[in-house]
Image (cartoon, grey):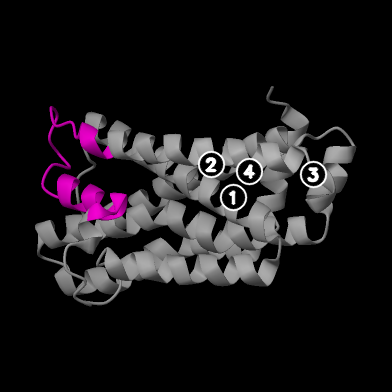
Amino acid sequence: MIQKRKLVFEFQNLLGNMITLFFGFAFAPMMALVFGSSYDNVPQALNQLYLSFFSTIPLSMVFVGFSSLFSQEVEHGFTLRAELFGYSRVSQALHKFIALTGFVLLSSIIYSWIFLSHFNLPLPSPSIMVQMAIFQILSTAVYFMIIFLLTMILKKFSQVYGISMISYFAIMIISGIMGNMNVGKLGNYLPIKLFITDYTKHLNDTDYISGKIGLYLLILLGILGVIMKVVVGNKNGNKHQY
């Protein structure tokens, strides 16, 4: 059950983390405007750039910001103390995810307004905007579950943050957002790469629907959900390890 008091607490918790605020709200528009100046009169290239950094918002928010915050909470025993006071592990995860998703969507709106208005680009069609919002929500869920599982298994800030940062830059490089490294077809299996490729030419289409990306993300969520159920079940039986 969603409780307003707990949700407000999680929002305040995120607001107090400067890493989350910078990489979640400032990084995407800052980088996009810098690189976008080279493609000022090339709409197709601008659309691709727009979607590239749009798709990094949940990645940055979770892998850089949330991983830092949550791993420190676990290492310092905050999550365990909260559980002892009746704030269950499932409830903590749910409220954290909702707060994080709210930040991702807000950041996506701000970024879109800054980028599109700066380069005088039209808004995506309403149906495409809905699909973009769904992509952000599902991506946030996938990244959240990965970091949640990683933190529950390792329980150390240095280890969790080290792996999450390496993974963050690896995904950026493999998907082609950062650098021009040739990784063959590996990037084609990343949801980010599929999203950018599929929607670059269809931002203003009113009848375009790309269901394969959503299906792909739902399959990933299902697999992660099974893993989380096993891990959480084991932790429930060994609470002193958490």
Q: Which picture quadrant has residue 122?
A: top left
- Circle nearer the N terminus (3, 4): 4
- Label 3 vs label 1, nearer the camera: 3
- Circle nearer the N terminus (1, 2): 1
Image quarter of the N terminus: top right
- Asked if the residues shown at circle 3 and circle 4 are in contact, with their CB atoms under 8 angstroms apart, the answer is no
- Check residue 149 in the rendering and tell me which mark sits there, or answer none: 1
The three-letter amino acid code for the residue at tag 3 is: Asn
**Residue carrying label 3:** 238
Q: CA distance from mark 1 to mark 2?
A: 8 Å
- Check residue 227 in the rendering and tell me which mark sits there, or answer none: 2
- Circle nearer the N terminus (3, 1): 1
Q: CA distance from mark 3 to mark 1?
A: 16 Å
The three-letter amino acid code for the residue at tag 4 is: Val
- Asked if the residues shown at circle 4 and circle 1 are in contact, with their CB atoms under 8 angstroms apart, the answer is yes
Can you give x and y, in whole percent of width and height, for residue 22 in the image?
Answer: 54, 65
Q: Which picture quadrant has residue 93?
A: top right
Asked whether residue 96 is in view, the answer is no
- Label 4 vs label 1, nearer the camera: 4
Could you tell me which secondary element the residue under label 4 belongs to?
Answer: helix
- Magenta stretch holds residue 200: yes
- Asked if the residues shown at circle 4 and circle 2 are in contact, with their CB atoms under 8 angstroms apart, the answer is yes
Residue lying at the far top in this picture: please name it.
1
- Magenta stretch holds residue 217: no
Bounds of the magenta span?
A: 189-213
